[in-house]
Amino acid sequence: MASHHDSLFHRIFADTAHAAAMFRLLLPPELVAAIDWSTLTALPCQITDEELRKHFPDFVFSARLRDHDLFVLLVPEYKSGDDPGTVLQELRYALNLWLKWTSEHPDSDGLPPILPVLFHDGNKPWRSPTSLRGHFDLGGLAAVRAKDPALAAVIEANGVSLVSSVLDLASRDEQWLRTIEFPDRPRLALLCMHFVRFQDPAQGIATLDRWRDLIAAVHRGSGGQAGFLGVESYLLDVTELDEVQVSGVVQRATGTGEKVMSTAERLRKEGEARGEARGEARGEANGRTQHAIETVLRLLTRRFGEPAESVALRVRGASLVDLDRWTERVLDARTLDDVFAAD
């Protein structure tokens, strides 16, 4: 489900060092060289207004240029599938961030440039516009450019532009992800999100075994065993692999049984806390439904504020099919009505 992909993305890239690696991978080389990455800072984006909250990004980072007195804001956005409204969503983010900036910096006459970054992990390449110019072209500007390039250039120079840098995993292969300069833990997360989630258990085990060196490196890293826990939970949530199979891969990668069993035990406790039972069919169904209810309510609260009691009752009484559909929608829905719209 999209919520698990979104959750892993947030868990991995909430780490500033991992966010810096993502930005360096995505932004134009000139910008990467110009930014002083030691100044990269996650900014608090606490919005109490329920209506405004859904128009603010989950993450905002600031960074200073090396040789200039200028801060830029970097705004990452995750999409699990193509979304034609992404640029307009980013434009809303930018407008509200600038309004917030002016209210918090009343003595400043200027605004910080905003650099949107799009991380796409769908099973098909991204096709929608990644800039306002792309939307303008769809509206007819491309035809003007073909007949009168000078006029089109004037229109572009006098119009608003917003360009998003895009990492589109659908157009990248495993070799690319394995060889780019990137930290081990987010590299493993991206690989799992883009490849293992589409594979059956036999294929998944074979793929994970092929990445033993990377799994072992994550376990040896600063986060140790805990650094792999988010990826492990993700695999158990979105694939048909069970704890024994995932633990077996880790044991083969690390050569240690004790650590693997410790991780598996923590995962079992985490599953029990969410009401998940992986043993008998009834327990599994009840656990999945309860977990889905909690997921929908949590995501609704994050996007639109605390839901009304009538909304909460509707969610708690819904079928698993409805809950799964709402979970997919809530991440990209613009309004609460969009989440519950009839198919």
Image: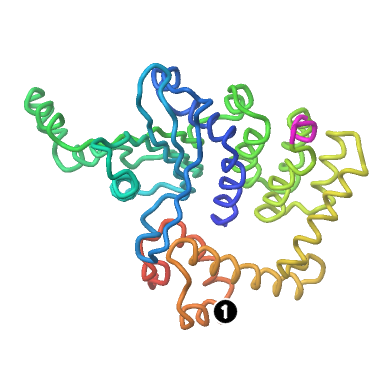
Q: Is residue 240 left or right of residue 44?
A: right
SS class, disc 1: helix
Name which residue lies at 38% across and 32% down: 72
Residue 283 within the segment the image draws in magenta: no
Q: Nearer the viewer, residue 211 or 90?
A: 90
- Which stretch did the figure color magenta? 217-222
Determine whether 39 is above or below 101 in the image.
Answer: above
Q: Is residue 167 left or right of residue 174?
A: left
Q: Amino acid at mark 1?
A: Arg
Q: Residue 294 in the image: state x and y as whole percent.
A: 60, 69
Q: Residue 99 in the image: state x and y as whole percent.
A: 29, 49
Q: Is residue 3 left or right of residue 84?
A: right
Q: Main secondary structure of the magenta part?
A: helix
**Quarter containing the N terminus:** bottom right
Determine whether 13 is above or below 333 in the image.
Answer: above
Residue 220 within the segment the image draws in magenta: yes
Determine whether 156 is above or below 225 in the image.
Answer: above
